[in-house]
Structure formats: structure tokens, C-alpha cells
Image: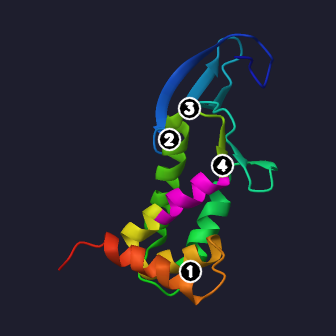
Amino acid sequence: MRCPSCYYNGTRVIDSRPVDDNKEIRRRRECESCGFRFTTFEKIEETPLIVVKKDGSREEFSREKVLRGLIRACEKRPVSLEQLEQIVFSIEKELRRLGNSEVSSVDVGEMVMDELAKVDEVAYVRFASVYRQFKDINVFMQELTELLNRQPKK
């Protein structure tokens, strides 16, 4: 590591700590020549995850975009932001676990709906109505019937 003060190419690590939920390492370093101390951050470089949309176009997976859709679906519902962030985290983790560099937007949407159905039924129906672009009330009723059939009998 090169010193930002004197540009000497030798530093030693004084302290290391995990940060950002163990996704990065913060290191305090000291130049072996001039004694200047500075901080560096080290993190894993992840390969980009590409989403293939219905029209064939491609864009990089965006946690923020998924989270915005979830927030909109859960508006005025008793679902915390932490729950929504956890959903986004688990979806991205699962997509990366599958090992494909490209994933279809349909798969992402289905994963979001599966997770939402576990958290809040109303938010699920809201998201599904936009995502599946219900054409009429019959399609909407069919989705509600499927949701009711998935629920354990009380």
C-alpha cells in the first residue's frame, strides 16, 4: 500500500475491524517511512447482476429499485423498513447464490411476491396487481383465490 503523504510503498497495518455487517474491513495503516497514519477499506468486488427485462433490455440489479417497489406496496401497512430491507437482502443473496450473472425480471418479481406474501397479504395483492398488470376483475379474483388457497386453514 502506498502512503498518501510521502508515496513510500511500504505500510503496516495497525488495526483491522469488520464494518458494514462484515461486508468490509476497515484498516488503520502507518507508513514505514514517514509515520503518517491513514485508513483504508477493503471489500469484496461482486460481479454485476444483470436483470433481463420482458422487452429483452438489460440493466444492473438495483436494490434501491426493488426497495422502492416494496415501500410503495407496503404504504400505510404495518411493515417496517427493516423488514423490507431484509426482503431485498434475501432476494439479492438468493440471486447471487444461484450463480447466474443474468436473471429475468420475471424471476425477480416472483421472488418479491413470494416474500411479500409471507409478510403482508394486502401489500402482496398491491404489488401483484401492478406487477402482473391485471386486465380485469376476474384475473384479480383468481390471484386472490390462489392467495387464499396458500394460507393454512384456521
Reading the image, the residue beneath label 2 is 19
Residue lying at 56% horizontally and 73% vertically, measured from the top left? 128
Q: Is residue 43 magenta?
A: no
Q: Quadrant of residue 117?
A: bottom left
Residue lying at 62% horizontally and 62% vertically, measured from the top left? 66
Between disc 2 and disc 1, whose residue precedes? 2
* Disc 2 element: strand
Between disc 3 and disc 2, whose residue precedes? 2
In the rendered structure, find residue 139 and report the number of the disc placed on it. Answer: 1
Q: What is the span of residues highlighted in magenta in the rendered image?
A: 105-113
In the rendered structure, find residue 99 and report the number of the disc placed on it. Answer: 3
Residue 150 to residue 57: above or below: below
In the rendered structure, find residue 90 and report the number of the disc placed on it. Answer: none
Density class for disc 1 (Cα within 10 Å; few <14, some 14-19, many ≥20) is: some
Looking at the rendered structure, the kind of residue marked 4 is Ser
Reading the image, the residue beneath label 4 is 104
